[in-house]
Amino acid sequence: MNTAAHSLTEAATSKFVRIKDGELDLQLHYNDAGQGAETVVMLHGSGPGASGWANFHRNIEPMVAAGYRVILMDCPGWSKSDPIVCTGSRSELNARALKGLLDALDIQRAHLIGNSMGGHSAVAFALANPSRVGKLVLMGGGTGGPSQFVPMPTEGIKLLQGLYREPTIENLKRMMNVFVYDTSSLTEELFQARLANMLTRPDHLQNFVKSLAANPKQFTDYGPRLGEITAPTLVIWGRDDRFVPMDIGLRLIAGMPNAELHVFNRCGHWAQWEHADKFNRMVLDFLAH
Ligand SMILES: O=C(O)/C=C/C(=O)/C=C/C=C(\O)C(=O)O
């Protein structure tokens, strides 16, 4: 391991910033790794205990080694970022938070990699700030619209919401067993780390439940506006995604003029983790050409 890779720990890259945008006034946590001229921002999903580091820890080092600066933003209401009750569009809230973060760091343009809610948020950001987006990579998310084939909410989302309401190890295991295709990859260490993340911030868990009660449809359906996004976009999905079904990926490429889709077989909702090596190679190739 070289010196740069050696310093790629959550603690060594952990930072905070205060952002203000109208009535939005929040402290955000983010991880900042690498020093490239081009920046890749990674946006995590909406599960209890999720964070940029938890979602993307298998993807950071290859991007840094390839010469990118990598920013992992913890969305408002997750991890070490400030708590919030979201009564409107969470996709738009996260997009505003990202704009605040990029402004504070003086980053004019970035590539965005979004997982699930992170995909919805990346699309919201691209619609509001088209000139600030290089390329987009969307996994298991991108628009909050309904599946045409699978009843919504999906079994995964029902388990996720149940876990927010009753944050127990049993409910966590139930959710994570649906999360991935190959459940043998889920270790007790992973469960315990995720449980600890969740239980460290009961305020985030309670706020998510309050947000859902105030507005059950947290993620805007950007279906009608997808044609406005001209940024080159790589959509990546797991064929066995039981949280956000694969046909949403088809909707994305039908709507986005410069989008292409890769479907991983034997893959659930966490393509960047379950197929990390191939995912990293594909994303690096896509960003470079
Ligand atoms: O309801 C949706 O469309 C989005 C759901 C998610 O964002 C779920 C994400 C779960 C994770 O990626 C996680 O790590 O918990």
Image (cartoon, rainbow, N blue to C red):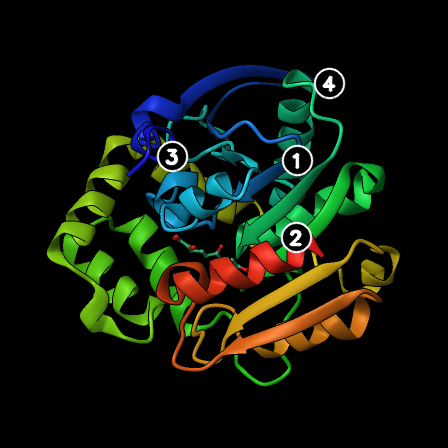
Task: Where is residue 256? Give x, y as percent.
Answer: 80, 65
Residue 125 or residue 71, whichever sits in front? 71
Earlier-in-chain disc, 2 versus 1: 1
Between the residue at mark 2 and the residue at mark 1, the CA separation in whole angstroms equals 10 Å
Which residue is under mark 3? 204
Q: Which residue is at a point 29% across and 63% down the rendered structure image?
A: 175
Task: Where is residue 70? Give x, y as percent.
Answer: 53, 35
Q: Find numbered disc 2 in the image and state the secondary structure of the residue it sits on.
A: helix
Between the residue at mark 3 and the residue at mark 1, the CA separation in whole angstroms equals 32 Å
Task: Where is residue 111? Give x, y as percent.
Answer: 67, 44
Q: Quadrant of the N terminus?
A: top left
**Amino acid residing under circle 3:** His
* Residue 283, numbered label: none
Which residue is under mark 1? 38
Which residue is under mark 4? 22
**Amino acid residing under circle 2:** Leu
**Amino acid residing under circle 4:** Gly
- Residue 184's quadrant in the figure? bottom left
Label pair 1/4, CB-CB below 8 angstroms: no
Q: Quadrant of the C terminus?
A: bottom right
Residue 4 or residue 260, whichever sits in front? 4
Can residue 42 be seen? yes
Earlier-in-chain disc, 3 versus 2: 3
Q: Find numbered disc 4 in the image and state the secondary structure of the residue it sits on.
A: loop
Label pair 2/1, CB-CB below 8 angstroms: yes
- Residue 137's quadrant in the figure? bottom right
Between the residue at mark 2 and the residue at mark 4, the CA separation in whole angstroms equals 33 Å
Earlier-in-chain disc, 3 versus 4: 4
Q: Residues within 10 Å of mark 1 (few under 14, many from 20)?
A: some
Residue 237 or residue 160, whichever sits in front? 237
